[in-house]
Image (tube, helix red, strand yellow):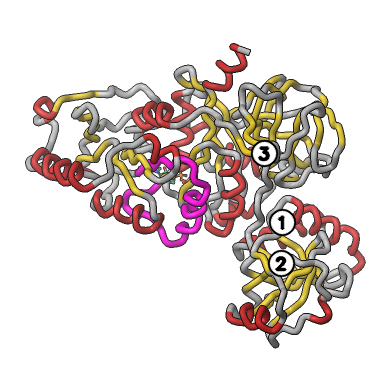
Amino acid sequence: MADLRKEIEKRRTFAIISHPDAGKTTLTEKFLLYGGAINLAGSVKGKATARHAVSDWMEIEKERGISVTSSVLQFNYDNYCINILDTPGHQDFSEDTYRTLMAADSAVMVIDGSKGVEAQTRKLFKVCVMRHIPIFTFINKMDRDAMDTFELLDDIEKELGIATCPINWPIGSGKEFKGVYDRATEKIHVFSDTEKGTKEGEDQVLTLDEADSVLLPGQRDQLADEIELLDGASAEFDQELVDKGELSPVFFGSALTNFGVEIFLKHFLKMTTPPLPRKADVGLIDPVEEEFSGFIFKIQANMNKAHRDRIAFMRICSGKFEAGMEVLHVQEGKKIRLSQPQQMMAQDRKIVEEAYAGDIIGLFDPGIFSIGDTVCMAGHKIQYEGIPTFAPEHFARVRQVDTMKRKQFVKGIEQIAQEGAIQIFQEYNTGMEEIIVGVVGVLQFDVLKYRLNNEYNVEIRLENLPYEHIRWIENREIDLDKISGTSDMKKIKDLKGRPLLLWVNSWSIGMTMDRNPGLELSEFGR
Ligand code: GDP
């Protein structure tokens, strides 16, 4: 028990989110470097190599230069066992990010200091705030000309509705970047352009007086003014507010030159929590006291094209996992043996023999798991809260080009829907002939098209539909035929046969409610 507690308490599981190009990959590489996972950071998870080693099934990632799927990395540092969950850096995959955040205990938000919170990723960051987990901000690329520091913080506070608390403060930026001032110790960590990819760099820490010779004329006065202003204006550090996700500790640095990364890592590991109890139907499940349990938060198909495998990612929430153990898959009510779990270590996948609460393991999935499913010990059945599906915002009718390939088409589209990348609907009253696809971000249409073609050898045509609003009908006893809607309304059903309504205009929703007293509508498919 003591061992179990020790193992679990050293776990730190967090998601890392950013706009594309803000420096998430570079920062992750540097983290790994400190963990001693690799010698030269660039060789591990560079754009051309490892990112695709994990997800090279998706050419779209390369074509568009974005990461569409998330992967998991584990490394040890300073007696901590760290699990990093990567998330796609595009707002069209914000639902995927949300699911990944369900498996994380905190989040690190990487922001490009020259750009601030970028419009196209606002949604992604908002999703992060929605989870109410601690959010840490790393403002990157300070070796490039950055926006005014106060403006950057203002941007975060305004855009995301979360207070900020700078733990350190940058001195200059770009060519004039001299380092960061640590507010707690009142010392300056002097910037030196560490040789790319190595962690040995001198970390020179000076007092303000000592640093005078390093700073440019005027920088010390400016720093004094800014700190005074900051002390008066900004929120004080408050661990409780950080825990609730209401206050974000902010750090400045430059991942590429490896400056500020270790300072960040050290503070971050102290400010974030080990796995905490999680809510299930029977109450809170303590990670240490309870037997093994976990839930599936992501399903990824065809990670390795040669094997056509499907991996279900499970977050372990309590206890210890051992390879080969027999567990209960709650949603199916079946006992299964978890024989071949995998874990990602840098770019390799390896078989895990044991894992603990806080860890993420990849389970071979012959098509039995759905997102949100609970896995636990048969003698102690529990069920974690499900993961809500976002209401799709774009709809299209899907047609096969070659109607002879009906079977592959249905199989492919159903599998992709099970992974949660798309939602599929049928016309009310007809079968699978007419399929309507709903997505949260339009890029998912491209992914669908690409994957059906590439993995299932099925070519499709998508015809965009004008609908933008969707509601599930909660009271199922209602006679769908009798619902009288507006002229822009369409009746459909989802994969589970649940009835839904689609509209082009938002005001039609209210009108439909008025015309059908007793009709109960919901924005989530539960
Ligand atoms: P991601 O898309 O968020 O994973 O971003 P990457 O880590 O791939 O970085 C995008 C680009 O920015 C790459 O060319 C990096 O070398 C560069 N970059 C990352 N961090 C820094 C930094 O601190 N300073 C500068 N100047 N460039 C950086």
Residue at which label 3 appears: 280
Which range is magenta? 111-140
Tell me the residue at 56%/55% (across/down): 94
Q: Badge 1: how crowded within 10 Å, few (<14), some, or many (20+)?
A: few
Location of residue 459 (image quadrant): bottom right
Tell me the residue at 77%/76% (across/down): 491
Helix, strand or loop under label 2: strand
Residue at which label 2 appears: 472
Mark 1 touches mark 2? (CB < 8 Å): yes
Mark sitting on residue 484: none
The verdict on residue 325 being magenta is no
Q: Residue 445, percent across and down? A: 67, 64
The verdict on residue 125 being magenta is yes
On screen, residue 275 above or below 490: above
Location of residue 247 (image quadrant): top left
Q: Which of 301 and 54 is in front in this view?
A: 301
Give the residue furthest to the front. Answer: 518
Q: Badge 3: how crowded within 10 Å, few (<14), some, or many (20+)?
A: some
Sequence order check: which comes first, mark 1 or mark 2?
Answer: 2
